[in-house]
Image (cartoon, grey):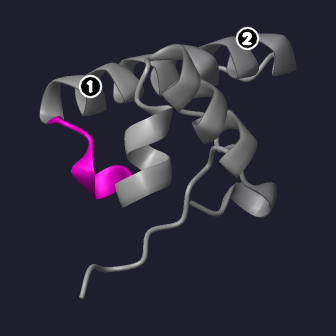
Amino acid sequence: MAAHRSSLLSPASMDAIARDLGVADIVAREGWGAVPSRQCGMVVRVAVEHAERLLAERGTHPGQSLWPNGRR
């Protein structure tokens, strides 16, 4: 059984990334585990770009915690 991992991206964001990269049908049928590694790498790249844009909009600098009270 795979370990449960929480995501900083909302399910809607993950769905949008999957659609943008053309893997939404695979994710819908078989889940993220069935997405080929090359596309998974692209998902990570797009997710990092999304997070960087979000940080820039918030005025948060790299290394600064996104969590309340400095929790990680």
Task: State whether residue 31 appears in this view.
Answer: no
Estimate the spatial distance between the alpha carbons at disc 2 and disc 1, rounded to whole Å: 26 Å
Residue under the point 44% across and 69% down: 5
Question: Residue type at mark 2?
Answer: Ala
Q: Residue furthest left?
A: 37
Q: Disc 1 marks which residue?
A: 39
Label 2 or label 1, whichever lies nearer to me, is 1
Residue under the point 42% across and 54% down: 29
Task: State whether residue 22 appears in this view.
Answer: yes
Examine the rendered structure and indicate whether residue 22 appears above or below residue 23: above
Q: Disc 2 marks which residue?
A: 56
Category of crowding for the residue at label 1, using alpha-carbon neighbours closer than 10 angstroms: few (below 14), some (14–19), many (at least 20): some
Question: Residue type at mark 1?
Answer: Gln
On the image, the x and y values in percent for residue 48 come to 48, 23
Residue under the point 35% across and 58% down: 30
Residue 47 located left or right of residue 10: left
Examine the rendered structure and indicate whether residue 61 appears above or below residue 11: above
Between 1 and 66, the one lying in front of the other is 1
Examine the rendered structure and indicate whether residue 46 appears above or below residue 67: above
Q: Is residue 25 magenta?
A: no
Q: Which residues are magenta?
A: 31-36
